[in-house]
Each structure stands twice: as structure tokens, then as C-alpha cells.
Image: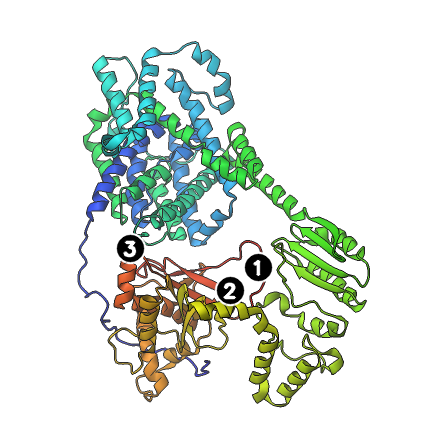
Amino acid sequence: MTLCTPARTTTRPPVQRPHSPPEGPRRFRIAGADLSASVAVFLIALPLSLGIALATGAPLQSGLVAAAVGGLVAGRFGGSPLQVSGPAAGLTVVTAEIIQLYGWRTTCAVTVLAGLAQLGLSALRVARSALAVSPAIVHGMVAGIGATIALAQLHIVLGGTPQSSAVDNVLGLPAQLADIHGAGLAISALTVAVLLCWPRLPGRAGQLVRKVPAALVGVAGATAAATFAGLAVPRVDLPSWSSHALPGMPEGPVLGIAAAVLTITLVTSVQSLLSAVAVDKLVAARPDGGRGVPRSVLDRELAGQGAANMVSGALGGLPVAGVAVRSVANVSAGAVSRASTMLHGLWIVLAALLLVPVIDLIPLPALAALVMVVGIQMVSITHIRTVTRHREVVVYVVTLSGVVLVGILEGVALGIAVAISVSLHRLARTRITREERDGRHLLHVRGQLTFLAVPRLSRALHQLPHGSDVVVELDGSFMDHAAYETLSDWSSGHVAHGGTVEMTGPSGVRITDPTPTADTASASAAHACCRPWTPWHNHQCGEQPAERTAGSAGPGGPAEATEAAASRRSPGLHLASGIGKFQRNTAPLVRDELARLAREGQRPSQLFLTCADSRLVTSMITSSGPGDLFTVRNVGNLVPLPGEESGDDSVAAAIEYAVEVLRVDSITVCGHSGCGAMQALLSGGPDDPPTPLRRWLRHGRPSLERMASRRHAWARISGRLPADAVEQLCLTNVVQQLEHLRAYEPVARRLAEGTLTLHGMYFHVGEAQAYLLAGADEVHSYDDVFTQVMPTGPREPARAS
């Protein structure tokens, strides 16, 4: 419904909702799972931080500073609660090069500037744009960095000093192999053996001891062996914190410093965001489905990484990024909140202050071996198989080679150029073949139909005989306007000359209306204005350019022309006319499916609760058909709280029936733009007469209170704030009604069992765009963000509805 009452703002005192927790001071609580997870992550982070600092040539203390800051600052302010941040192996090559060129103090200043740049990018809300980079480029960049790290650390393992580039390290290996230091090589070999064998210990005993991180066991074992054997190997030497180097003013060419800042910003941002997405997938794969853990908010995560880099650089630490190894350990250890990440940072601080004598016993070859193994593991066989399966191995190889031979920025740029070239090649590569079968001409079109393929498509179409029966099979996911016009014009001309045309998909299913004939060509052209975009049939396209006559009747011939004329004369007959068209055109297509549903009963997969607004066509926006959705519609898509006096139990009855009897898998609350109920809520006042509409709308008052409350962040739509108060309330109402759903005992029980999920959805009518609520399973998340649903994959043929 649409109410045109002008909106006016009313101020209401906050009220305590019956399902809300009691107000009062909040106490800081740490779950036992977070405490144990923080210890596990700390035991991994301590040796890795020292090893990465050693590999970059930075002061060893800088690795501990970055680990502590990553845990405390990024853990507190980041948008991914379970992601662990700190010095990352992927930054080793970049940081080492900057230190060699400009020195350590300038490197710290570059880290601060990179953090500031990340804060700026977060303010611009471009975090999701980083995910647009081809995975082949990201995997190639990571593999290139890993190969470079492994080559450099191999020299240290053998007792030498790494060169400045990967090429020099390869060329210098023969000389290094001729001058091996036995003690250092023995310690490194012991470390590598433990790292490789520890995760593969068999039996129940092995399962128990594997809970201790392999990195800790390897470094601790190598330290013990070197100490008891009295081996003369270089060891960690942490200087006094009083002499710890802090950043200075950047010294060097402006362009060089800017390139360094850009590189640090790019690598840390992309790595952190991709790691956050991976952490979300790991959390969702838990047996409980990640219940209680909100999804990552990428822009906030980018801001948290920026703040951590600014603090780390200011305190003389390495650049900070989200790291996969420690994050996986955190999730696997059962962490449930950001407390585990922050506690691991606290343990790093305590170790750096209290365990210096123990840390000084660690042999440097052991740390070098640890980082070398990490570098080798960055060249993932799984990633290589993935890019090969998706035919992007060329992009992967070029990116990897560019990173190893030239540099990270240059390698990524080469990868992007090759990825664009591959995409353009695929877009322009269209195969068109002809064959004749059973007196019909078949034209097969493989690939994307763009203007580049129009000349060949037009040539193939006009070689088909006039008046023949033609089937055009389209096997692609994209068709641009030029190709569509070419097909449409040729089809109209071919039908006018007495032929028939049928458009099908790769499976032979029709993707247009039944084949037109000569006497229906004009009617088909009249409806061509809307057929490609709408999955329903027999609707009205608005005013036709001219009155149709019996000679230009629609697909049903003169009978439909008569019905249409009667509908125009008497609007009351419009419904009957539509029913007649259904019986004639649509019923034959769906009769078998409906007969099956009549025999077997309904088995919908979800309860779909939406507004009664006539502009919402649920089957259209969800591409669903008979038996898919158990739909409940009411004014404002409201879910009254259980136990409230409403005089209407229809919504509660539908929820109980769907959850307990039909056993649906999910419940979706769908709001929409321009909702008249939300406008009425905004414009309502305490003195309004208690009409049935006003009594019903009181179930939406908690949404008003939520929007006005400072305890809840304003809902956002695809990274932007809503256009006005009505849109804000429409979005907030979806989130609030999801919270109301949780108050129903059957829903709460199924959620606890992990057999039911809740989803929030918003449909913008004017844009014909659907948005899904990110983190809908946790309505108390920091941000309520509706993300745009993008089309993927080939377009399917329309279903009759």
C-alpha cells in the first residue's frame, strides 16, 4: 500500500522491549574458548614474528611490536572478530627492499603513511573493490612472494647471506652449496623435519600432541638441541628496549617513497581482506554454523588494519596485515570473539618484556628454516589446481614470474594486464556453427554475443534459407544490445517471409515465447519491449502504440484480441481475461508440476515473509515456482512479538506451521523501498485514531525505536547510507523483525539446533535490485549492512508462474 501522508518526525522516549536484555553496566567477560585459543595463537605468533623480522633485515624487536599491535589494535578495531593480524610473510620481500633502499627509520615512517592511506580507503568504502581482483592474480602474487622468501632464507639455512633479488639468490646457490656451515644446516634440518612430521604424527597420542603448534615445537626443539650440544650458531640477540629504533622523517626521492607506501598499502589491504573472507568461510563451516560470530565488515577491517599500521610504524614495528596461518589456528581452536585476538597480543607484550633471556637462546638458522617452510607453503598446489581448472594458469604464471623477477607492483600490474587480455579474448571468442536436422536448420552459437561477433552472426543468419524452420541455440551468459538487435531484426524478417524461429538454451529449453507465425508477427513485436526482462507471461506492457485488430492478434489469435478489447472497455473484466490467458497459455506448461505437488504435498524450502505491497512479485525476485516458498504477506512485513495482544495470530500461526510442520530450512524477511507502512509509522502521532491499520502498525514501533537508538548502528545499503528516513526505517525494520523472529520458541529451538537460518532482504522497487543483509544470523552485529546481489552465471530460461 502507498500512503501519501507527509512524513513528520516524532520524538519518543526509549522503552524497554520485553525481549531485550536489562539495561545496566556491562562487565568484560572472557570465554574459556577465547582464552585457550589466544594461547595457541601466541605460541605460533612468537617464533613467526621473530623469523619474519629476521628475514626482512629489520630489528628483531620490530616483529614482536607488530605482533602485539596487530593483536591489540587490529583485534579491537578491525571488522573481522576472529582474524589475527601481525607481521606477515607476504610482506617480507616488500619490507626488506624498502629497508635496503631507505633504512629502518624511513621504513617505519612508510608504514605509518600506509596505515593512513588505509584509513582513507576505508572512509571511501572501497574494501569490497579489492575482492574484484582475479583470484589467479592474488594466488600468483602470494606464490611469487613465497618463492622469493624461500630462496632468500635458503642461503641463511646453508650458513650464508641472501642477495638482494631472487635472480641473484638463484645464481649464488652453487657457490653457497660449496661453502656449507654444518652446525647451522643441522639445526635448520632439524627444524624443517619437525615442521613437516609433527602434523602427521599417527594414533591417539599423535592427535593429542598435535594440539601443540608445530612452529613452537620445531623452534623449541632446535633451541634445546643447539644449547645442549653446545653448537656454535648465531642466536637471537634482542637489544635493550631503551635503544629500540623509532621512525624518523622519510628520507629519499618522493616518487620512491610514494611507491613504497603504495606497495605496502596494496599488499596489506588485499591480504587482510582476502584473509577476512576466508575466516568467514571457516567460521561458517563449524559444526554450529558460526552461531554468535558476526560476519566480517570489510571497510571496518580495513580501518582497523590502517590504525594498526600507524601504531606499529610509530612504535618501530613491521607492517601489519591479517595472516591466514594464525587466523586458521584461532578459528580451529574454537575462538568465539575478538577477545582471543587481543589476548594473544597481550601475551606477546608479556613475553617481550619477561622472556628476553629465553628468546635470546633461539638459533637464527631455526627461524630461517621456519620462514623458508612458510614461503614454500605459500606456493599452494591447491591454488594451482584451482586456476588450472578455471583456465587462468597463464595469469597465475605471469603474475608469479613478474613478482619474482621484477617486483610485486610490477608483477601484479602484469597479471592484471594478462587477466584483462584473457577476459577480452573470451568475450570476443564466439563460435557459430550450422547444421540441418530433420528438415530444420540448427544454428549453434557458443560464447558471449557482443558487437564483436555481430558481423559473423549476421552472415550466418542471412545464409539460412527464406521460409525455413530455424532453431537458434544460444550457449552463453551475455548478450549485448547490438547482438540482441541483430537477432530480433532477423527473426522478424524471417517470420515475415513465412519461416519459423525458435530460440533455445544449451539444453534445448525455449527462452522466448512460442514460435511466432506470419499472422502474429506484429503482436510479437508489440510485446518484445518487455519479454527479455520479465520471467512472467501474459502481462500488460502499458499502452500499446496502436489498437490491435483481429489481423494482428497476439499469440492466442483473435480470441485474445477480443479479450484485450473487452478488458479495455470494462476494467472489471481484466482479472477474468488474465485467468483465461493462464488457462490457455501457462496451464499446459505447469500442469504436470502442479499435479506432482498435488500428489506429494508441499515441501517448501523457506518461509518468505514480505509486505503486501502489490509491486512485490515474490516469484519474480526469487526466481521461484510452485512449491518453493511458503509466503506470508502483511502490511509492513511485520512479525508481532509472541505474547502481545494483537487480535491476529495469523503470522504466529504461519511461523509455527512452517517451522514445526513443513520444517523449512530458512526464513526470509523481505522489505522494500517506498513502503507505505513505514511512511505511516514515521508520520504517525500519539493522538491518531486507533484504526485497524494503526493498531497493526504498533508492531513496527520497535523498528522506530531501534532507528532512534544510539545502541544500534544505522543500517546501510551496499556501503552507503539510506537516501532518506523512510528508506532507513525500511532497512531497520527488516533487521528488527528478524530479532522478533528469534523470540518465537520454535524458531529459537531450530536455530540452536543449527537446522534453521534467518535472512534479511531488501528490494528496491525503482532499481529492480535485491539486497541481502550481511550477517543476518547475528542481528546484534556492529553494522547492519545490506549488500547488493549481483547476477552470476548464465541466464536461465524463465519459469512459468
Residue contact at pointers 3 and 2, CB within 8 angstroms: no
- The image's mark for residue 796 is 1
Name the amino acid, label 2. Ser
User: For the N terminus, which image quadrant?
Assistant: bottom left
Q: Secondary structure at mark 3?
A: loop
Decide which of tag 1 and tag 3 comes sooner along the chain: 3
Q: CA distance from mark 2 to mark 1?
A: 10 Å
Is residue 321 or residue 639 the one in the foreground?
A: 639
- Residue occupied by mark 2: 623
Is residue 437 or residue 219 the one in the foreground?
A: 437
Q: Secondary structure at mark 1?
A: loop
Q: Nearer the viewer, mark 1 or mark 3?
A: 1
Name the residue: 30% across, 52% down.
288
Residue contact at pointers 1 and 3, CB within 8 angstroms: no
Residue contact at pointers 2 and 1, CB within 8 angstroms: yes
- Residue occupied by mark 3: 292
Q: Quadrant of residue 472?
A: bottom right
